Image (spheres, rainbow, N blue to C red):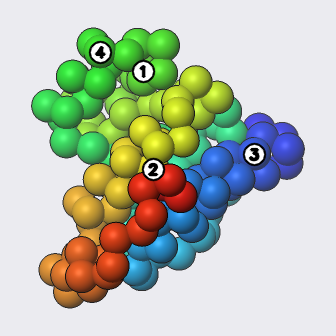
Amino acid sequence: MTTADLNRAFDWMRAAASELELPGTEETTWFGRPCLRVRGKSFVGSKDGKALVVYCHVDEKEMLLEAAPDIYFQTDHYKGYPAVLIRPERIERNELKLRIERAWRMCASKRMLAEYDQRPLMNPKSK
């Protein structure tokens, strides 16, 4: 994994997550790979600087893999694990933001969820 791959992966995550303004989110690394965490739990990261790993429920993962195999995939390492791999260059920005928000919701505290849900809605055109 090159520095350019790492920077690109951080850029994908940073761009989508910053628009969402998810409370408690921190940008960090896990085993030298970029990730976003909340409450010490990683909810989105980079597999190899080219694919993103996004936390999701296993049943939702199966649906995504079947519905859009050009965007979503898994390797043997992730089978049965509540995360899906994403080809960021193939996913629309709003879809990536949705995946990141849903992953964050799985790890955020009730207080954080309430804080986020009580914010005024953003202009849909800015999403």
N-term mark: 4 or 1? 4
Task: Give yes or no for contact between labels 4 and 1 (Cβ–Cβ under 8 Å).
Answer: no
Q: How far apart, in angstroms, are the residues tagged by discs 4 and 3?
A: 26 Å
In front: label 4 or label 1? 4
Q: Which residue is mark 4?
A: 67
Q: Which residue is mark 3?
A: 8
In front: label 3 or label 2? 2
Q: How far apart, in angstroms, are the residues tagged by discs 1 and 3?
A: 19 Å
2 vs 123, nearest the viewer? 123
Callout 4 crowding tier (Cα within 10 Å): few <14, some 14–19, many ≥20: few
N-term mark: 3 or 2? 3
In this rendering, the answer to whether 100 lies above or below 41 is above
Callout 2 crowding tier (Cα within 10 Å): few <14, some 14–19, many ≥20: many
Task: Give yes or no for contact between labels 2 and 1 (Cβ–Cβ under 8 Å).
Answer: no
Q: Residue 118 falls in which quadrant of the image? A: bottom left
Q: How far apart, in angstroms, are the residues tagged by discs 2 and 1?
A: 18 Å
Q: Can you give x and y, in whole percent of width and height, for residue 122 in the image? A: 42, 68
Callout 3 crowding tier (Cα within 10 Å): few <14, some 14–19, many ≥20: some
Q: Secondary structure at mark 3?
A: helix
Which numbered circle lies on residue 97?
2
N-term mark: 4 or 2? 4
Q: Secondary structure at mark 4?
A: helix
N-term mark: 4 or 3? 3
Which numbered circle lies on residue 73?
1
Instruction: Identify the amino acid type marked 1.
Output: Phe
In front: label 4 or label 3? 4
Q: Secondary structure at mark 2?
A: helix
Q: Can you give x and y, in whole percent of width and height, for residue 89 in the image? A: 64, 29
